[in-house]
Image: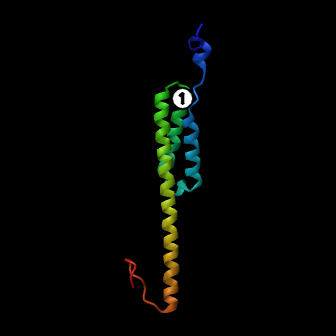
């Protein structure tokens, strides 16, 4: 009898390589501060990963792959938004430090466009 027709083969769990990729992307997003800078994207990525696991358990592989792809995209977006948020904060801190130095040196404040 062919192996793919056996009951044991029907019960085998399909392992999707995208599952690990999505889990890693989600972990990276959490690590870089997505809970602060991109909470919705982080939540969506987490929910989609869980839904993909459920679809995999139900042997709905096409749906699982689509959900994993969406999870990865949302995780990547969360990482990008987190990096942008941290960069903006660093710019604000540096701008405040520059303003203090300009004041101490007796120079005119810099306008928003970057020119005194």
Q: Which image quadrant for residue 6? A: top right
Q: Residues within 10 Å of mark 1 (few under 14, many from 20)?
A: many
Q: Position of residue 19 (x, y in %)?
A: 56, 36
Q: Quadrant of the N terminus?
A: top right
Q: Residue furthest left?
A: 113
Q: Residue furthest top?
A: 1
Q: Please say whether residue 107 is visible from this viewpoint.
A: yes
Q: Is residue 84 left or right of residue 12?
A: left
Numbered marks: total: 1
Q: Is residue 1 left or right of residue 61?
A: right
Measuring 53% from the left and 43% from the top, which residue is drawn there?
Answer: 46
Q: Please say whether residue 44 is visible from this viewpoint.
A: no
Q: What secondary structure is marked by label 1?
A: helix
Q: Residue furthest front?
A: 2
Measuring 52% from the left and 85% from the top, which residue is drawn there?
Answer: 101
Q: Position of residue 22 (x, y in %)?
A: 54, 41
Q: How is the image coloured?
A: rainbow
Measuring 52% from the left and 75% from the top, which residue is drawn there?
Answer: 94
105 is higher (above) or lower (below) than 64 = below
On the image, numbered disc 1 is attached to which residue? 56
Q: Quadrant of the C terminus?
A: bottom left
Q: Which image quadrant for residue 56? A: top right
56 is higher (above) or lower (below) than 75 = above
Q: Position of residue 84 (x, y in %)?
A: 48, 61
Residue closest to the eye, 31 or 114: 114
Q: Position of residue 90 (x, y in %)?
A: 52, 69
Measuring 52% from the left and 34% from the top, which residue is drawn there?
Answer: 52
92 is higher (above) or lower (below) than 81 = below
Q: Residue furthest bottom?
A: 106
């Amino acid at each position: 009898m062919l192996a793919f027709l056996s009951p044991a083969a029907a019960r085998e769990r399909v392992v999707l390589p995208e599952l690990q990729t999505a889990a890693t992307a989600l972990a990276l997003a959490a690590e870089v501060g997505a809970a602060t800078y991109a909470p919705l994207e982080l939540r969506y990525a987490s929910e989609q990963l869980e839904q993909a696991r459920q679809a995999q358990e139900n042997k709905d592989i096409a749906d699982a792959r689509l959900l994993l792809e969406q999870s990865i995209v949302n995780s990547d977006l969360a990482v990008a938004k987190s990096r942008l948020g941290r960069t903006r904060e660093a710019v604000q801190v540096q701008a405040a430090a520059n303003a203090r130095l300009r004041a101490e040196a007796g120079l005119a404040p810099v306008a928003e466009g970057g020119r005194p």
